[in-house]
Image (cartoon, helix red, strand yellow):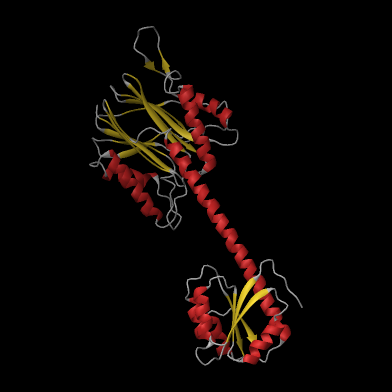
């Protein structure tokens, strides 16, 4: 009988009886392996301490200086860089003895008196198993290396994606503003932007691409580029009746309509929700348009109550001729407005319950003395606590601003 493994392995065999060692040498001569014999368990242990390239250990159970289970226990405690396949050679067949051998770390048993065919077959099988384990280990190492490269690429993508987002805090004229943006993975599909478009008008938008992860992030990045190129913060929604007359912001829904038409040039199989709004910083009048996005929340400084506004609308990117409606609300001095993605109200706890808009309104009311930034951080922490150990399943973005009148 001969066996030629793809890679030659090293096998350590330990037995205090010379005749047994001689028998094993004859039986295994057809195996393409380096056979290292020891009469002492301690000598074998010393060898294993200095050589970590051994693939298999075959040891007798009963030996004078150290028995097989004790040797196995000490070998398993070694900081080996790979798994060592161990076989116990014994004439003990009681259930308790076999259980003890397994408990200390034996992978298989060889029985005395020696049966050559059994010895050869089991050691051959052990060599094949060890080869498979080593192959699996190498594949896992390559996979781990590939995953490391992917994570590095995703981190780079996240940094690039962050470059298209404006800073997360702003104080201009009568507006104090802050944004919290937390992708559920390295890169996310949420997008936001804001800009002062006339002396008295402040525009903002928030977009939530369906799904999350790399596909959503790629579409989000493309949208950010298209929004910038199309100048949707200006030409699309600003109209002037006469040259020299103060520009008037009209028909805010035109911005969403333009984005909807442009989206079909970017992707034909993905859609997104959004809210687009323009606040008159002199009067407090907010004109806004929703496209399948969650409602806005308006916190009244006078009453201390937070209420939802908006009727939802139709998502962008599904129908090229979809109609969108402009809605209005008035902000009073020191009122606060919040625009958020569905990652907040749809966050689930262990029982499958949603965080919900009502709970979000209560947090906004309770945080009326906090700065906008601190309030957004508290909301995010409450969402994390609500989800407990469960991973958030969607990106979280929330824009909050206060109109100081």
Quadrant the C terminus occupies = top left
Q: Is residue 300 above or below residue 285?
A: below
Q: Residue at x 55, y 25 (%)?
A: 261
Q: State the residue at coordinates (35%, 34%).
A: 167
Identify the residue at the far top of this view.
Answer: 243
Determine if residue 128 is in view: yes
The answer to whether 42 appears left or right of 21 in the picture is left
Q: Quadrant of residue 128?
A: bottom right
Q: Position of residue 312 (x, y in %)?
A: 46, 35
Q: Position of residue 246 (x, y in %)?
A: 34, 12
x, y percentage for residue 202?
Answer: 34, 25
Asked if residue 314 shows in the view, the reply is: no
If the image is split into quadrants, where does the N terminus sit? bottom right
Residue 165: image location, x then y, percent? 41, 34
Image vertical order of residue 249 relative to residue 146, above or below: above
Q: Nearer the viewer, residue 291 or 329?
A: 291
- Residue at 51 percent of width and 80 percent of height: 45
Residue at 73 percent of width and 73 percent of height: 3
In the displayed structure, 268 sits above or below 147; it is: above
Asked whether, in this view, residue 183 is left or right of residue 103, the answer is: left
- Residue 289, quarter of picture: top left
- Count the labels in the image: 0
Left or right? Give the position of 261 relative to 156.
Answer: right
């Amino acid at each position: 009988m001969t066996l030629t493994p793809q890679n030659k392995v090293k096998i350590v065999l330990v037995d205090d009886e010379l005749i047994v060692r001689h028998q094993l040498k004859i039986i295994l001569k057809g195996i393409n392996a380096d056979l290292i014999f020891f009469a002492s368990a301690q000598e074998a242990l010393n060898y294993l301490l200095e050589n970590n390239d051994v693939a298999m250990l075959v040891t007798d159970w009963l030996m004078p200086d150290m028995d097989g289970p004790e040797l196995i226990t000490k070998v398993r405690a070694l900081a080996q860089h790979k798994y060592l396949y161990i076989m116990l050679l014994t004439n003990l067949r009681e259930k308790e003895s076999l259980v003890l051998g397994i408990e200390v770390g034996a992978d298989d048993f060889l029985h005395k008196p020696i049966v050559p065919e059994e010895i050869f077959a089991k050691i051959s099988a052990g060599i094949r198993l060890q080869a498979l384990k080593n192959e699996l280990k190498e594949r896992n190492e390559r996979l781990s290396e590939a995953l490391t490269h992917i994570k590095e690429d995703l981190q780079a993508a996240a940094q690039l994606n962050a470059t298209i987002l404006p800073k997360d805090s702003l104080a201009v004229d009568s507006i104090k503003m802050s944004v919290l943006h937390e992708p559920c993975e390295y890169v996310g599909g949420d997008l936001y932007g804001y800009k002062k478009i006339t002396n008295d008008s402040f525009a903002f938008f928030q977009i939530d691409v369906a799904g999350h992860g790399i596909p959503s992030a790629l579409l989000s990045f493309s949208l950010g580029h298209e929004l910038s190129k199309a100048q949707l913060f200006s030409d699309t929604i600003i109209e002037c009746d006469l040259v020299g007359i103060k520009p008037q912001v009209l028909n805010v829904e035109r911005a969403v309509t333009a984005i909807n038409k442009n989206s079909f040039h970017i992707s034909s199989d993905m859609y997104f929700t959004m809210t687009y709004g323009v606040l008159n910083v002199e009067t407090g009048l907010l004109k806004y348009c929703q496209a399948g996005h969650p409602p806005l929340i308006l916190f009244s400084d006078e009453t201390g109550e937070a209420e939802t506004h908006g009727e939802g609308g139709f998502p962008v990117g599904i129908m090229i001729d979809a109609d969108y409606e402009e809605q209005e609300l008035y902000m009073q001095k020191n009122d606060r407005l919040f625009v958020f993605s569905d990652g907040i109200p749809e966050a689930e706890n262990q029982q499958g319950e949603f965080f919900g808009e009502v709970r979000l309104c209560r947090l906004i009311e309770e945080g009326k003395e906090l700065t906008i930034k601190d309030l957004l951080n508290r909301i995010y922490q409450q969402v994390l606590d609500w989800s407990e150990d469960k991973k958030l399943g969607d990106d979280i973005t929330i824009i909050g601003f206060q109109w100081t009148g």
